[in-house]
Amino acid sequence: MPPWPRRSPRSCGLTRMEKNTQKKEEEEEEEEEEERKRRERESREKVEREREREREREKDVFETHFFFFRVDQDLSSGQLEPPVVTYEPNVGMVLTINNDRKIIPNVKQLRLNCRCARCIEEFTGRVMVSGKDIPDTITPLKIAPRGNYAVEITWSDRHGSIFSYSSLLEQAK
């Protein structure tokens, strides 16, 4: 028998296995805490990005509405000439406002954006015309102004559309 009293492993503190288990648990808790902090940070960043996008959208909408309000106001007061809308085969629809050219390159897309009762179901708002219903070679046959606010376009598929100048400006580049 050794000269010192024999003690149980418990009385000396934690065993090696218990220490390893405790260390693993502490590491797992730290990893979980780091993961929770990372998710919170990503969530805050996502919310901030969404807020920034919303601010940009509001700014764009405000500027767009302000521009169209100014155009409509200037048109009604006679300060501005109505836009001139023409078609150039290799360019697209061209809107000219006070010598400033705006172009709508995709004429087929413009035709698809028609909002008449034949193209949009009146009560549900369901689009009744698809891209395959309209030929890729569609062109405007006739473009005629309608007052100081719109233009009427007769298409090569014999459909007629009326677009306000502001809706054409929204689609222009």
Image (tube, helix red, strand yellow):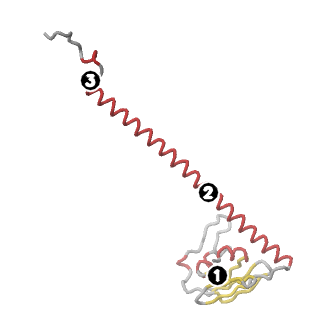
For residue 52, the mark is: 2
Label 1–label 2 contact, CB within 8 A: no
- Residue 94 sits in quarter: bottom right
Extreme residue in the front direction: 3
Q: Amino acid at mark 2?
A: Glu
Q: Residue at x 54, y 83 (%)?
A: 136
Please state the horizontal and vertical placement of residue 47, each as a whole percent of the image: 58, 51
For marks 3 and 2, give the CA distance: 55 Å
Q: Earlier in the sequence, mark 3 or mark 2?
A: 3
Dot 3 corresponds to which residue? 15
For label 3, count other residues whose C-alpha is less than 10 Å away and answer few (under 14), some (14-19) or many (20+): few
Residue closer to the observer: 77 or 23: 23
Q: Amino acid at mark 1?
A: Ile
For residue 103, the mark is: 1
Q: Amino acid at mark 3?
A: Thr
Q: Earlier in the sequence, mark 1 or mark 2?
A: 2
Locate the C terminus by quadrant: bottom right
